[in-house]
Image (tube, grey):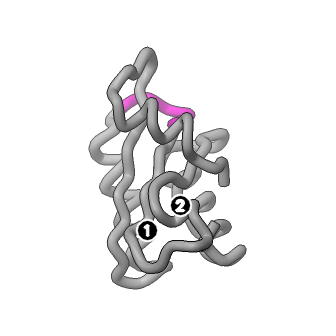
């Protein structure tokens, strides 16, 4: 996994601040592979709170930009019964942070 311990802590803290305590985050995509270079940070968030998800997602993206700097970060928010292909792929190939 190509994230530092500090980056992982920032991502977790930002998810909890935006989506509530108990929210979980999974890293997926090219950053999971130690042999690849570059790439954006792809995150799947399983929120503790399922209300006002767009506002919460924007809050998390804002926190990440302030704390990690300008990086390409994609956040996918999982909803109950979510069967979108991107969510399935993230669950199958991702690494919990």
Q: Is residue 19 above or below residue 65?
A: above
Q: Are marks 1 and 2 in contact (CB under 8 Å)?
A: yes
Report the label total: 2
Q: CA distance from mark 1 to mark 2?
A: 6 Å
Residue sticking out furthest to the top: 81
- Residue found at the far bottom of this picture: 69
Circle number at residue 14: 2
Q: Specify whether residue 42 is painted magenta.
A: no
Where is 23 relative to 66, above or below? above
Residue 84 on image: x %, y %: 33, 27
Q: What quarter of the picture does the C terminus occupy? A: bottom right
Numbered badge on residue 63: 1
Residue 62 at x, y percent in the picture:
35, 67
Indicate the quadrant containing the N terminus: top left, top right, bottom left or bottom right.
Answer: bottom right
Q: Residue furthest right?
A: 5
Q: Is 1 on the left-hand or right-hand side of 75? A: right
Point 36% across, 78% down: residue: 71
32 to 40, vertically: above or below:
above
Give, as a single range, the part of the protein colored magenta: 46-51
Pointer 1 or 2: first along the chain: 2
Q: Is residue 39 above or below residue 60?
A: below
Q: Secondary structure at mark 2?
A: helix
Q: Nearer the viewer, residue 75 or 23?
A: 75
User: Which quadrant of the view contains residue 89?
Assistant: top left
């Amino acid at each position: 996994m190509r994230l530092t311990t500090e980056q992982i802590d920032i991502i977790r803290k930002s998810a909890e601040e935006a989506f509530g305590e108990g929210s979980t985050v999974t890293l997926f995509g090219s950053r999971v592979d130690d042999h690849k270079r570059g790439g954006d940070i792809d995150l799947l968030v399983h929120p503790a709170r399922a209300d006002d998800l767009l506002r919460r997602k924007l809050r998390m993206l804002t926190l990440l930009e302030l704390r990690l700097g300008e990086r390409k970060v994609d956040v996918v928010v999982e909803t109950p019964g979510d069967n979108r292909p991107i969510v399935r792929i993230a669950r199958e190939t991702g690494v919990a942070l």
